[in-house]
Amino acid sequence: MGSNQSNLHVRGSTAPPSSETESYRSITSWQRGHWVSPMQRIPPEILSEIFIYCVLIDNEQFVRPRFRTAPLLLLRICRYWRDRAMSTPQLWCSLQIHDVKFTNRRRRLDDAKLLDLQSARLSSEMAMLGDWLSRARGQQLSLRIHFSGTLPDQAPECYEVLRYWFSGCHVLSLSVSREWLEVLSGLGCSVLEDFTIEVPHPPRTFGNVFSLQFPCHAPSLRRLTLKNTADMVVPYLAISPTSLKEMHCHDVLLSTNLVEFLKGCESLISWSMLSLHLPRNMEDSIGDMTLPNLEELVISDYSKRGEACSFLQNPDLHLPNLRRLDLNPKASGIANVASITAFATRSGCTLTHLKMHSSIPVCSEVAEFRALLSAIPSLEVLHIQTREVPICSEDGSSISIFASLMRPPAEAGLIHRLPCLSDLAITTTCIPPGVPSATYIENMIRSRTQDHDYVGHNVARLTSVMITLAVSSAVPMTVRWHRLVAGRLSRELTVEHFNTYCVEEVTL
């Protein structure tokens, strides 16, 4: 009896360790089974997120099919990674295709052989396009096509492949020759939201030879970018007037076709024109042009004729809801204060952001600058850049320019200009004797950073300052005020002739 009880006691006491041993053995066997590939311990969902991050880390809108980068690199590691990458549709929803130019520099080939190589290359690109995007499985497609060559013999077959995938793209960018644009004829892109069309080297007679049999329909288009051939392509784009929000034109002629297209874009919010060219008789070509919802306008003419100012001076241009105006963002071209003042007064818009980059003085006298500040009292951001010339062509006007920006004391009872100004950036050249002193500039900044005298008034404080004065004298020097933080401002002095540089901290 005692032995049986002892046996039962032993068996009962050893039962829990037996279950723990089995659990330990199962864990050990699982670890041994995955010892060769530790990455397989990561859950498939987390591994897919890591793969997606490998694609996004390049910060490119379109993915290039290169074996040294994701996602093609992920297919070459192991079978587990390959299966996981192939089953992650987010890796295959973006693609960028470039054609390859075959030359005779290293290979002595006749024209027929070169044409065969180009045709073979194009066929392989079309096959890759289908295999790549078919793995996206319902994701929003982003596709960029760059074909610089002429139209090959197998164009009909390529058209069928391209049209099939174009119809399902949300983002589409085309940089092709004129002949390739025939693929857009009658194309229906019901989900297209971002469309870019570029012809790298358009012929001079482009408008006389280009035409589409049927227009391209994009009812959901929200962003349109046209380069080089905007005035010729827009007649063949059928869009919804309430969907287009952004339009960017590069190196375009503001012709009748483009103006008529813009008149139908009632919901347009942002419009930028880089390298603008105006026709000789602009008023007859443009006519009445009203964009009721436009909030941002960027114009850069890259010429010495001041076409950006001429565009604003058009009496038939009405932008009543404009908030942001940026002239010549690449620091080239001409900006004119008088044209902006007349435009703001005529349109009745409430500008909050104004940026001017000009290669000549923006005004001929200080009174024009003061009239501008009075015409746009709601201005919050003011950036003026005239690097090699003064802001005003009037002698000794630099001091008066900064005096116009100074806020008067509250007890004076004077109406101060720009009560909402919070961001000020000025880059200009000063010619003696009209050079404002450092104390004068700092007093102007101090008057706009201390608002204790305006308690109860709708007055804003400066939160960002960047003022750069290049003094053109026998000893050229540059003074810069920036880094406005907690009532302190940095002042930098650079004297290139003596290779001197010093930084001081100013308390406001």
Image: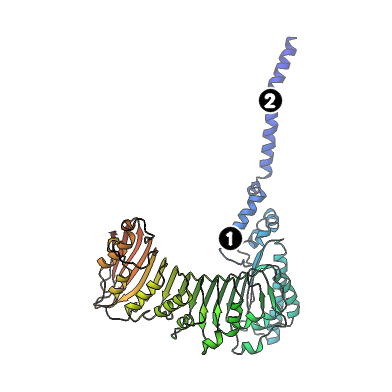
| Front-lying residue, 294 or 458 | 458
| Image coords of residue 270 (percent x, y) | 54, 71
Query: Residue drawn 29% across and 67% down?
Result: 441
| Residue at (57, 79) in percent of width and height | 227
Residue at numbered disc 1: 56
With 383 as the anchor, is 137 left or right in this view?
Answer: right
Mark 1, mark 2: which one is toward the viewer? 1
| Other-residue count near label 1 (Cα within 10 Å), few / some / many at <14 / 14–19 / ≥20 | some
Q: Which amino acid is tagged 1?
A: Leu
The label on residue 493 is none
Name the amino acid type tagged 2. Pro
- Which quarter of the picture shows residue 340? bottom left
Residue 135 seen in the figure: yes
Along the horizontal axis of the image, is 243 left or right of 326? Answer: right
| Vertical relation: 262 (above or below) 205 | above
Measure the alpha-carbon separation of dots 1 and 2: 51 Å
Q: Earlier in the sequence, mark 1 or mark 2?
A: 2
Badge 2: residue crowd in 10 Å (few <14, some 14–19, many ≥20) = few
* Left or right placement of residue 277 versus residue 69 in this view: left
Q: Residue at x 67, y 38 (%)?
A: 28
Q: Where does the C terminus fall, quadrant-wise?
A: bottom left
User: Which quadrant of the view contains residue 480?
Assistant: bottom left
Determine whether 144 is above or below 105 in the image. above
State the colouring used for the structure image. Answer: rainbow
Query: Residue 263: x and y, percent?
Result: 59, 78
Q: Position of residue 251 (x, y in %)?
A: 54, 81
Residue 346 appears left or right of 470: right
Determine which residue is flagged by label 2. Answer: 16
